[in-house]
Image (tube, helix red, strand yellow):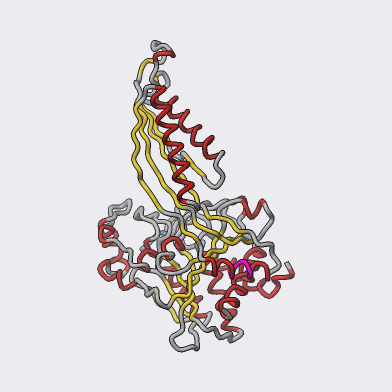
Amino acid sequence: MGEFVEFTELATQVMARCETLGTISQDPTCLDRRYLTDQHKLANQLASGWMIEAGMTTWQDAVGNIWGRYTSSVPNAPRLILGSHLDTVPNGGKYDGMLGVVAAISLVAMFDGTQTKLPFHIDIVGFCDEEGTRFGTTLLGSRALTGKWQEQWRHLKDENGVSLEQAMANFGLNFDAVNSAAISRTDILGYIELHIEQGPVLEQENLPVGVVSAIAGAKRFNFTVEGMAGHAGTVPMSMRRDALCASAEMLLAVESISLQRPGVVATVGKIENAPNGVNVISGRTRFSLDIRSEDDSLRDSVLAEILQKFDDIAQSRQVTLTREQTHSAPAVHCDSQLKDALVRGVEESGIAPRILASGAGHDAMAIADICPVAMLFTRCKGGISHHPAESITSEDVAASLSVLYRTIGKLKHA
């Protein structure tokens, strides 16, 4: 792509650095880098070295996020924060999270190389725990910045029984000092996160990048359907209270209702059946529901429709239905000014602007509590993420760098 020729070399550097980070894993058979491990420390050291090469000063905060600052020459300058996360899921890919940190560093290196002066500091953050894989609670690194760190997290334990408090001590951090990681909201221009799309839309529309409108809010539930177990050969069909058949009808209702309501996605991803015997009528079934939308009121109205249908099915099939809500997060809407600056950056890069919502959660969700946020998506092959098959192209990285460069230029003259 000739129009991004000035970013081609930087894009090659970004791809190579993502490859290097992709070798730092606690599991020799796949990429698996979790919070407060030796591999977390190595990734921070690597990112810090690249930041220093780019002309930045660096530090690690009290929760384990790695930071770099490209200092403004203006006294009392505000800060523009760029970044994403450096942790991965087990058997993860090389670009989810890492791209947003590494690309931001290469962009700052470009500013430093041309001695570009900005009226604001550029702060790059490599968040330490977006995925929540080790302790089961997501966004620990970014939530520490917002002052939303919770005392009860002290006792969270990993699969080996190591508590969060102990893991922090082993890493050289102090759980009781985490509040010092919180940052002032008075001097932040905003937070911009570059991330792979994790979906197929950009690839389908043959676009290298897209601008995020909002991060979907999600609710999750576990449902239990109780029927009556019985012998598969002796109970007549008309007399059965089959929990699995009732659940199957409910699952299809989730799909059919959601298909009729654009802007909402709903998923049943987990199901358990008992007694689960080949010759036994199902007596109890449990299943999950995950429902998301960038419009909370739309999501909740569709959820109400689904729940009503569930109740109707339970009544007609003479089974009992109970539910437990396990998660609730509101949608986060991107800041209109930052979003517009990204759109103009896309247009000036010669790309048709495409605005789309993010169905996945990101550090930007947490950071939205303290400052305006915006996100830029980079196309990824097949929309695949959280998997070794994660794949992006150097050309699309160059396009992403071009958009960010021009966006920062817009903010510089705002």
The image quadrant where one finds the C terminus is bottom right
The residues colored magenta run 341-345
Residue positioned 64% across, 71% down in the render: 402
User: Relative to 328, does residue 270 appear above or below in the rendering?
Assistant: above
Residue positioned 56% across, 39% down in the render: 259
What is the magenta segment's predominant secondary structure? Answer: helix
User: Relative to 270, does residue 204 appear above or below in the rendering?
Assistant: below
Residue 20 seen in the figure: no
- Spot occupied by residue 406 in the image (x, y as percentages of width and height): 62, 74
Of residues 26 and 152, the one drawn nearer to the viewer in this rendering? 152
Of residues 216 and 272, the one drawn nearer to the viewer in this rendering? 216
Of residues 300 and 118, the one drawn nearer to the viewer in this rendering? 300
Residue farthest to the right? 2
The image quadrant where one finds the N terminus is bottom right
User: Relative to 203, does residue 363 appear above or below in the rendering?
Assistant: below
Q: How many badges with numbers are in the image? A: 0
* Residue 334 colored in magenta in the image: no
Residue 275 occupies which quadrant of the picture?
top left
- Spot occupied by residue 174 in the image (x, y as percentages of width and height): 27, 69
- Spot occupied by residue 285 in the image (x, y as percentages of width and height): 38, 30
107 to the left or right of 280: right
206 to the left or right of 115: right
Residue 26 seen in the figure: yes
- Spot occupied by residue 191 in the image (x, y as percentages of width and height): 48, 69
* Residue 344 colored in magenta in the image: yes
